[in-house]
Amino acid sequence: MLQHSEPRDFVVATGGNYSVREFLEMAAGYAGVDWTKYVEKDARYFRPTEVDSLQGDASKARRVLGWKPQISFDHLVKGMVEHDLELAQQELTLVRVGHKVARAAALTDRV
């Protein structure tokens, strides 16, 4: 996109359709936690005119740039969880040796 000769808007999407529940189940599975213990539905945030299904259309990026997704949804979620777990481990290490980090209160409860 950055090397394209003229500025344009492109959608980058897998073309797959996944629910928030599917994301939660997969991410929690990689993290080894039961997401139902940490996630609550709040009706205040439901939009009454929301569509049932949203799906990104990357056909323009494919057509103009020759772009196509290279990783699966599963691989993307796994990578996100692994990255967050690594950051959490780094923060915990800092807290254990006496450094203050932004979320130290949450971490020190488990130290």
Image: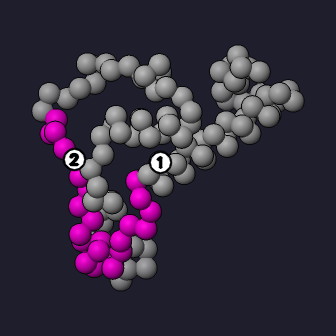
Q: Could you tell me how many numbered marks the image carries?
A: 2
Q: Label 1: how many residues lie within 10 Å, few (<14), some (14-19) or many (20+)?
A: some
Front-lying residue, 36 or 89: 36
| Residue 86 point in image, percent of width and height | 67, 43
Q: Is residue 88 left or right of residue 111?
A: left
Secondary structure at numbered mark 1: helix
Q: CA distance from mark 1 to mark 2?
A: 18 Å
Residue at point 47% right, 48% down? 77
User: Is 56 a magenta residue?
Assistant: yes
Depicted 47 relative to depicted 5: above or below: above
Q: Amino acid at mark 2?
A: Leu
Main SS category, magenta section: loop
Bounds of the magenta span?
50-73
Q: Quadrant of the C terminus?
A: top right
| Residue 108 point in image, percent of width and height | 73, 20
Q: Amino acid at mark 1?
A: Val
Q: Are marks 1 and 2 in contact (CB under 8 Å)?
A: no
Front-lying residue, 103 or 96: 96
Q: Which residue is mark 2?
A: 54
Depicted 111 relative to depicted 70: above or below: above
Q: Which mark is residue 77?
A: 1
